[in-house]
Amino acid sequence: MKKVVAGIDLHGNNVVIGIMDQDGKRVAHQKLECDLKKILQFLRPYKKQLEKVAVESTFNWYWLVDGLRARNYPVVLANPAKMDQYSGIKHADDKNDAFFLAELLRLGILPTGHIYDEELRPVRDLLRRRMGLVHQRTALMLSFKSLFARTTGQALSLQRVKTVTVAEAQELYQHPANQLIAGLQAQHVAELTKSIKKIEDVVLKVAQRLPYYVKLKTLPGVGIILGLTRMALR
């Protein structure tokens, strides 16, 4: 039985699957909805022949990769960011995109990414959300500092801004407009701090059960937050 490989070009509401044999011959292709049952139905006749299935790493790959792996399909995650050197082979339509993945897979030159542990992936995503919230909070605090510097010629530390209450923020100014924006920013900073803390508490409970997190904490300069971040990037 001749072995085959499959490339799956994944989009927000559909997938295109291309199946190719070891000689580079296109065996079959199909455009389907993002429905795991329909995808499995299409792949089923080729399952015993399939050496590997390449799924393009897009924003929504979790459900497809996890679903295929749960049914013992040999899945690899294709890294589109590393495919520039082969861009001359690729054509600008979904069918050829799927076969392009299959061709790179057949030739053994498909750039791949790491399929992160399914159980820990939501925890990693939580840390990503935390990072986004930290960026929002920092932007608000810098804006607060800037307003204070413009209106008073003085400076506030970020630590002071992080802990200032709404009432304290408003008392810094006489103009109602400045009082309003300062109060709102102080309120938002406080709420973001609460959200960040909730995420850290949940992630820390998981991290403390992982031996490599405990080892990370033994490194000089690696504290709770940096350890969690490094854990997420492993």
Image (cartoon, grey):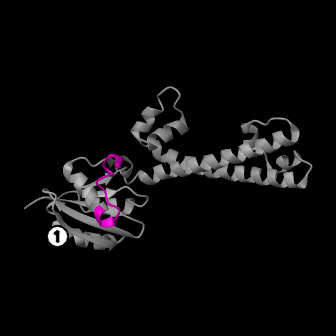
Is residue 142 depicted above or below 17 in this figure?
above
Determine the residue positioned at 77% across, 54% down: 184
Q: Residue 214 appears in which quarter of the rendering?
A: top left
Q: Which amino acid does the dot numbered 1 rest on?
A: Pro
Determine the residue positioned at 36% across, 63% down: 10
Is residue 61 depicted above or below 39 in this figure?
above
Determine the residue positioned at 61% across, 50% down: 133
Q: Residue furthest left?
A: 1
Q: Is residue 26 magenta?
A: no
* Viewer-nearest residue: 77 or 72: 77
- Give the magenta part as a residue range: 83-96
Tell me if I can see residue 108 in this picture: yes
Instruction: Using residue 225 as the reference point, say whether residue 55 is left or right of it.
Output: left
Determine the residue positioned at 28% across, 56% down: 101
Percent x, y of residue 65? 33, 59
In the picture of the structure, the residue carrying the numbered disc 1 is 45
Q: Is residue 91 magenta?
A: yes
Percent x, y of residue 34? 36, 70
* Viewer-nearest residue: 188 or 42: 42
